[in-house]
Each structure stands twice: as structure tokens, then as C-alpha cells.
Image (cartoon, grey):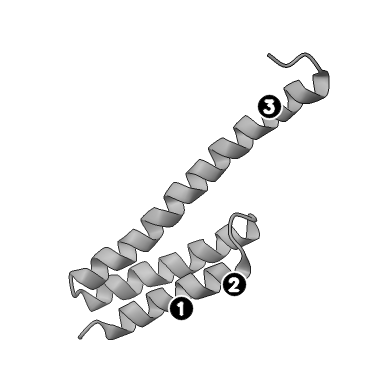
Amino acid sequence: MAHHKSTIKRIRQTVKRTERNRYYRTRFKNIVKAVTVAVEANDKAAAQEAFKVANRQIHKLVSKGFIKKTTAARKVSRLNIMVNKVAA
């Protein structure tokens, strides 16, 4: 058990940050999965709608500092390629 005030505070901060990052990580995976499922189902309209939501949400995660801008751009680009390959 920590005895210093600063260490106790750091533990509290770490717990908060871990919870927040776990939420963002789960959200990120679910966003990507929604697009992937729509693409695998060959549903062009659903895939485009899911991609639109994913694009917005992924860039929000960038502003929160969860992922880097380049990582977001790469993910969005790959999702867009997947969506564009779906036959109408």
C-alpha cells in the first residue's frame, strides 16, 4: 500500500485513465466491427452508413488522444477500401 500522498493520487489517476482507455478501446473495436460485419453481409447501404459513423467516431478518438492521427487515417482508409469493394 502506498504511503505518500503523491503516490496515492497517481494510483487514483491510473485507475481513472485505465477505465477510460478500456472504454475507448472497446468502442473502437465495436466501431470497426460494425463496418466489417456490414461489408461481410454484402449490404452496401448499411456498410456506407456504418462507415460514416466510424469515420466520425474514430476521429473523435484522435481528439481525445486515444489514437494518433496517422493511425486513424490508416484505419479509416482501410475501412473505406472495404466499403468500396462491396458490390451494389
Query: What amino acid is labelled 2 in the image?
Result: Thr
| Residue found 69% across the figure and 32% down from its top | 13
Nearer to me, 33 or 60: 33
- Say what secondary structure mark 1 lies in: helix
- Say what secondary structure mark 3 lies in: helix
Residue linked to disc 2? 70
Instruction: Report the mark closest to the observer, 3 or 1.
Output: 3
**Nearer-N-terminus badge (3/2):** 3
- Say what secondary structure mark 2 lies in: helix
Considering every residue shown, the one lying at the far left of the view is 41
Nearer to me, 81 or 1: 1
Mark 3 to mark 1 CA distance (whole Å):
38 Å
- Could you tell me residue 45's position as x and y percent? 26, 76
Query: What amino acid is labelled 1 in the image?
Result: Ser
- Could you tell me residue 28's position as x and y percent? 45, 56
| Residue found 50% across the figure and 67% down from its top | 56
Location of residue 18 by image quarter = top right
Location of residue 1 by image quarter = top right
Q: Is residue 9 shown above or below 74?
A: above
**Label of residue 11 in the image:** 3
Considering every residue shown, the one lying at the far front of the view is 1
- Could you tell me residue 51's position as x and y percent? 38, 71
The answer to whether marks 2 and 1 mark residues whose Cβ atoms lie closer than 8 Å is: no
**Nearer-N-terminus badge (2/1):** 2
Mark 3 to mark 2 CA distance (whole Å):
31 Å
Q: Is residue 66 shown above or below 9?
A: below
- Could you tell me residue 84's position as x and y percent? 32, 84
In the rendered structure, the answer to whether residue 50 lies left or right of residue 9 reads: left
Residue linked to disc 1? 77
